[in-house]
């Protein structure tokens, strides 16, 4: 039976009204007085799907069954300390076929630098324009490959928390792929600087981002040199990455940290600079990262109230140690994690407990996460955190197709662009909003309905590969499954159930479920 557009629109308007009501009540799920609730922290059996939904990129049958078999605590422990786990073969094959998987970053960069320089040498204007366009397209392709790899892992990795934390830290240590040649660098940044440390020690993560050319180039530290100070990275390193805007530092601290960071830069060539003889032992090169002592300010500094003796790259490590062990950093990082995973306004008590774990464990991210994910506040918040666009898109595809591997992530990338949250697309260093007001506009909700309709009808294009020999595989959404009736149906409000009962076709039913208020939250 064909769906009736007018009736579907009427049912959807009713659901949207329910969404608006639910949004008004879910902007904050924290305790108003800031005290810890004494309710037990254990996840009740009926809460297991909701807990899995929050810890993962979205509950589906496979992840739920694994958590049900192990029990929440054991499953969570596996998520906090993930062992290497293979993706489905069809997903891994797609990743293995990407240029970013086959070619090391220095070779990719060198090839594109040659392409850029060759284009610049062309005398004919039209030929030059064509060559420059090809260069830009090559960089676009590499950024798209990185986004494709990221989405495939979000959809299918058994280590769901690691993948979600990778997105969180990519957003926290944001770089914009549109600047300079960051489209070439961003995939490696995610793969080598972020993912390996996503659940490790915060100090290691911070150091890895500092030494990656994507961060150095994005925040202009390659322009930072003695007697020619650039404060961009130093300011964001304290304001956005560690202490927070209210972290107790001064403009003098920004200036002194900028002096400490002089000489930290990027070298895209295979040639080392000519370093003064007395400083040659100070020169450091690792991949595309370079510390050039010719550019470093070797004077003594005063940073965060303590002296730093001028001695080269070791000053940077001392400054990072100091930043990571500051109570302000523990509070700032803990609050941001709680905002992302628990509530738009997390309780001061929860943040304080997490910050205490951060300090006592020397910044062990998994330990901080455990304290949050086993807290009463976490249990009480389940189902009340509004999904940002990435969560909505990934969770909808996971729920609809479970472990059936998509052939084409382009529709997902297009949806994220439409909802103003493209991967690696935030221009400013603060990253995308983590709270409801950033994503709950009427325009956003209309777009989500259109996405729900595309996925629910089976016409989204996810199973139609692109390229010279495109493949297409039949993939019919099976949302009205035993998994739905066993786990999700009981979480639906009466209005949502009533709307589903009035659906005239499986496609309409799928659309209404995917656009329901409950599936806008996690």
Image (cartoon, rainbow, N blue to C red):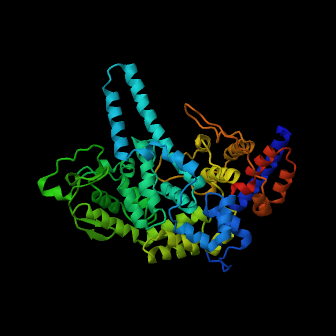
Nearer to us in this view, 419 or 302: 419
Nearer to us in this view, 316 or 23: 316
Nearer to us in this view, 444 or 518: 518
Tell me: 281 left or right of 143: left
The answer, for residue 424, to whether it is visible in the render is: no
In the displayed structure, would residue 265 be above or below residue 121?
A: below
In the displayed structure, would residue 492 be above or below residue 428?
A: below
Image location of residue 254, percent across then percent down: 34, 59
Image location of residue 374, percent across then percent down: 61, 74
Residue at 61% from the left image edge and 64% from the top image edge: 55
In the displayed structure, would residue 430 be above or below residue 6?
A: below
Q: How many numbered marks does the figure carry? A: 0
State which quadrant residue 371 falls in: bottom right
Tell me: 251 left or right of 96: left
The answer, for residue 249, to whether it is visible in the render is: yes
Residue at 42% from the left image edge and 62% from the top image edge: 205
In which quadrant is the C terminus drawn? bottom right
Image location of residue 176, percent across then percent down: 46, 46
């Amino acid at each position: 039976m064909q769906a009736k557009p007018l009736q579907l629109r009427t049912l959807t308007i009713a659901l949207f009204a329910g969404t608006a009501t639910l949004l008004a009540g879910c902007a904050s799920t924290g305790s108003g007085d800031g005290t810890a609730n004494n309710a037990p922290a254990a996840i009740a059996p009926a809460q297991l799907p909701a807990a899995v939904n929050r810890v993962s990129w979205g509950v589906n049958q496979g992840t739920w069954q694994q958590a049900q078999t192990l029990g929440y605590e054991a499953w969570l422990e596996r998520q906090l300390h993930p062992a290497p786990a293979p993706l489905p073969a069809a997903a891994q094959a797609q990743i293995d076929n990407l240029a970013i998987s086959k070619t090391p970053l220095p070779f990719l960069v060198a090839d594109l630098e040659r392409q850029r320089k060759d284009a610049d040498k062309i005398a004919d204007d039209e030929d030059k324009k064509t060559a420059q366009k090809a260069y830009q397209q090559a960089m676009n392709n590499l950024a798209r490959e990185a986004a494709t790899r990221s989405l495939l892992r979000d959809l299918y990795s058994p280590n769901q928390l690691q993948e979600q934390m990778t997105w969180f830290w990519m957003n926290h240590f944001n770089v914009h792929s549109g600047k300079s040649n960051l489209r070439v660098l961003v995939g490696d940044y995610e793969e080598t600087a972020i993912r390996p440390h996503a659940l490790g020690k915060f100090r290691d993560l911070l150091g890895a981002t500092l030494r990656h050319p994507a961060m150095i180039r994005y925040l202009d530290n390659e322009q930072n040199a003695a007697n020619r100070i650039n404060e961009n990275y130093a300011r964001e390193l304290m304001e956005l990455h560690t202490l927070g805007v209210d972290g107790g530092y001064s403009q003098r601290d920004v200036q002194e940290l900028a002096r400490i960071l002089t000489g930290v830069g990027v070298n895209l060539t295979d040639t080392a600079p000519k370093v003064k003889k007395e400083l040659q032992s100070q020169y450091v090169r690792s991949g595309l990262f370079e510390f050039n002592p010719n550019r470093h300010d070797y004077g003594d500094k005063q940073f965060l109230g303590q002296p730093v003796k001028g001695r080269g790259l070791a000053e940077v490590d001392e400054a990072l140690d100091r930043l990571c062990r500051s109570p302000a950093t523990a509070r700032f990082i803990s609050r941001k994690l709680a905002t992302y995973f628990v509530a738009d306004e997390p309780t001061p008590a929860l943040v304080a407990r997490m910050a205490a774990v951060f300090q006592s464990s020397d910044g062990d991210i998994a330990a901080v996460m455990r304290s949050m994910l086993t807290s009463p506040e976490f249990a009480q918040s389940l189902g009340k955190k509004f999904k940002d666009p990435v969560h909505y898109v990934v969770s909808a595809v996971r729920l609809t197709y479970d472990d059936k591997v998509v052939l084409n992530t382009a529709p997902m990338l297009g949806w994220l662009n439409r909802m103003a949250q493209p991967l690696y697309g935030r221009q400013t260093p603060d990253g995308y909003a983590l709270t409801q007001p950033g994503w709950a506009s009427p325009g956003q909700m209309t777009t989500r309905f259109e996405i729900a309709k595309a996925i629910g009808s089976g016409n989204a294009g996810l199973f139609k590969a692109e390229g010279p020999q495109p493949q297409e595989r039949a993939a019919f959404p099976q949302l009205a499954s035993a998994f739905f009736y066993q786990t999700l149906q009981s979480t639906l409000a009466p209005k949502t159930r009533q709307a589903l009962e009035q659906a005239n076709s499986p496609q309409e039913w799928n659309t209404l479920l995917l656009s329901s208020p409950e599936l806008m939250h996690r």
